[in-house]
Image: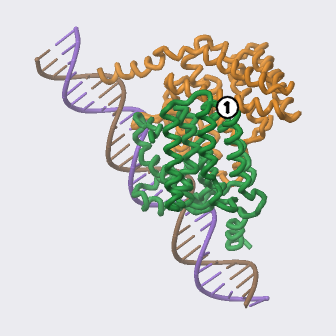
Chain colours: A green, B orange, C brown, D purple
Amino acid sequence: MTDARQKLDTVQSDSDEQLIVDRIYSAVMEQKLAPNTKLSEQTLCETFGVGRMRVRRALLLLSSQGIVELHSNRGAFIACPSPDEAQEVFEARLMIETGIVRELAHEISEAGIHALRTHVKEEDAARAVNDRTEIIRLSGEFHVELAKCHNNSVLTRVVRELVTRSSLIVALFGINKDSSCPDDEHASIIEAIVSGDPQSAEENIQHHLLHVKNSLDLEQTQKVEPDLAKILNGRM
Amino acid sequence: MTDARQKLDTVQSDSDEQLIVDRIYSAVMEQKLAPNTKLSEQTLCETFGVGRMRVRRALLLLSSQGIVELHSNRGAFIACPSPDEAQEVFEARLMIETGIVRELAHEISEAGIHALRTHVKEEDAARAVNDRTEIIRLSGEFHVELAKCHNNSVLTRVVRELVTRSSLIVALFGINKDSSCPDDEHASIIEAIVSGDPQSAEENIQHHLLHVKNSLDLEQTQKVEPDLAKILNGRM
DNA sequence: TTGACAAAGATTGTTAACAATGCAGTATCC
DNA sequence: GGATACTGCATTGTTAACAATCTTTGTCAA
């Protein structure tokens, strides 16, 4: 509900770039931009109606967050995380989000509870209409919403970055992409928090994240395919 | 010992920028660059012998990590965290680093233990020679070293960012800057980890971080001073 | 037909000049 | 004397042209 990012009072020149970054961010979280998609500067310039400088700055920011990969003299591509990177992202999430829900089980504001429950209702609504894009977006955003309950923009930023990268990972390695975030698990996490049971909250979030991670096939060679295509075209 | 950042194989154009970023990063961690220090483009260009574009890209990266603040048409300044931001950084660290040491208490490699103990020895050596710069640097780096034990570059990156911001915070709000990271507390954390006692490890790291945080005066108006000076010069 | 080589086109990387903004110092007016 | 307005300087922001690299296409020969 309340977007906790408004440190733009001193930095108004970033507004354009931030818009581009946010749009690409959202597109990735909705899995509308698949890994390895080329982001040509000219296309982005026309799309957003800005100069090339802004686009390049936005791409640099995205690359510093692991959402985009910059290849010298070849351009920008939606990142294509390796299985190792995927492993690391989920390990980091496991560690950080465990702490998040544990603390929330100790103390959470009424507003926070309300926001979380409202969010789950939105997820249900999206599921009822079978709006796949919205389902995917909300599934990821739920974890950001958990972080937001701490009213800590630093923490929220970290989680948002990890969740976005997770979207890429799911897009790459997901077998059954609909099972990425089962509905009832989110609700269970909330109930564990509300009932003030840190142990249960921990177990729930861990179970949930492992569930998502286990729905991936991190051993496969799916990543190789696009690279291979390019190699076959250009080199051999 | 082993720097876990080597994803530069595909991105060799970043090398120059990354050098600038790292140098400023280090200077901040050693508290050689105080908050609100102006970083003029020309100075940086001459210092690093690169074009203005590289400098501006580096500054953008630093600003995205909260190390530098970009003010429109005025330039780049070493960030001047507000008390609220300081609070958030330490809350985030408390949460994340608690998870880090807890997991390490469950499982840690021999190499990790060795790296940590070696690090503490280096701290002692620096203290023996009274090398204040090195003491400050190593004190912060210890926490990064803890993260590194997980062999997770994502996690390490998050911690490094938070630790660097902490350096700025200590520089701004620290009363007694020498007490920023007492020697024995680092050793205690290691011993708790090695003895496989998660509970004790948690308590140690939390005690340590709260100790650092409590050595700050987050209520003071120290931050206002530099701004005030500029306001007085320019406006009133 | 296939392979390599070469040229054309497209895209990115870099530089430099220009525009805009802020800052400081000075003069003027009250 | 103090405050305000103005002018010149320095710094940042933007744009456009140029250089370098990669990709593609076409040709030729085996």
Residues A130 and B217: in front is: A130
| Left or right relative to A80: residue B61 | left
Residue B175: tell me if it is visible: yes
Q: From the viewer's perspective, is residue A84 above or below residue A105?
A: below
Residues A51 and A29: in front is: A29
Question: Which residue is labeled 1 in the image?
Answer: A198
| Left or right relative to A213: residue A148 | left
Where residue A196 appears, as percent x and y from the top left, is 62, 30
Residues A52 and A121: in front is: A121
Where residue A22 appears, as percent x and y from the top left, is 49, 49
* Furthest residue toward right: B110
Q: Quadrant of the C terminus of chain B?
A: top left
Where residue B69 appears, as percent x and y from the top left, is 49, 33
| Left or right relative to A122: residue A218 | right
Q: From the viewer's perspective, is residue A20 above or below residue B142?
A: below
Residue A92: tell me if it is visible: no
Q: Residues within 10 Å of mark 1 (few under 14, many from 20)?
A: many
Residue at the image position 69 percent from the left and 46 percent from the top: A209
Mark 1 belongs to chain:
A
Q: Amino acid at mark 1?
A: Pro
